[in-house]
Image: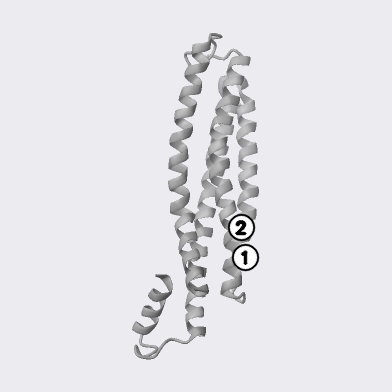
Amino acid sequence: MELELLKEIWEESGKKPANAPASGDAILRMIKKADLSMVSGMRRNLLIEVMLVLICATAIAVFYFVAFNGQLREVSWIYIIIAAGFLFYYYRKNALLKKMQCPVCDVRSNLDSQLKALEKYVRLYLVGGTALVPAVLAAFYILIRYKHIMILPFSNINTGWGLALYIALSAMLTVTLFFFHRWYIFKLYGRHIQRLKQMLEEMNG
């Protein structure tokens, strides 16, 4: 229990005798510090994410601009658009997390009003990130078929088995990345959100 743990830390810190209950204001101040610490961790994770996305998207975009005699430049633009979308997502989510770090806001109202919005951003990240996988693979397949570029053994075959194999591989990759993405999001954001929600429920209980 988050509140019980905070109370124990307060009592063991020597600032207040163990037999005297910590004041409500003192507990709220400690909760606010814990809140700020978790939000700071999420903002740090978000910054690392956006840097990695920009590095990877830039590398892929440059590769497809120059590879295959520039015949797949459309792929470069797809990744540039994805990077731009992630930058917009980063800006909005970072702005939300920054609001949650408001030092003068009431703990209860701040958590209650912002946690729901943060959960929506995280769900959007999971759903959108998963949907991008088959969408990009489908666009890539259409391009290599339309331009008759030999990249995969079945990329220029007009029979149904080539498309069926590509769809099967795309589905396997999408499902695998979905579970990885869900674990990854929980590790970076989900566990912090759950702890904050638990603290809020105990404060209101």
Label 2: state its secondary structure: helix
The residue drawn where x is 38% and y is 74% is 5
Pointers 1 and 2 in contact (C-beta within 8 Å): yes
Q: 154 or 196, which lies in front?
A: 196
Label 1: state its secondary structure: helix
Q: 2 or 67, which lies in front?
A: 2
The residue drawn where x is 35% and y is 87% is 14
The residue drawn where x is 59% and y is 15% is 145
Question: Would you name the residue on which mark 2 appears?
Answer: 117
Residue kind at label 1, given as amino acid type: Ser
Rendered location of residue 130, percent (x, y): 53, 38
Is residue 85 toward the left or the right of residue 50 in the image?
right
Picture mark count: 2
> Residue 61: which quarter of the image?
top right
Would you say residue 151 is visible in this rendering?
no
The residue drawn where x is 46% and y is 45% is 182
Would you say residue 194 is visible in this rendering?
yes
> Residue 66: which quarter of the image?
top right
Rendered location of residue 96, percent (x, y): 62, 60
Question: Would you name the residue on which mark 1 appears?
Answer: 113
Rendered location of residue 40, percent (x, y): 51, 64
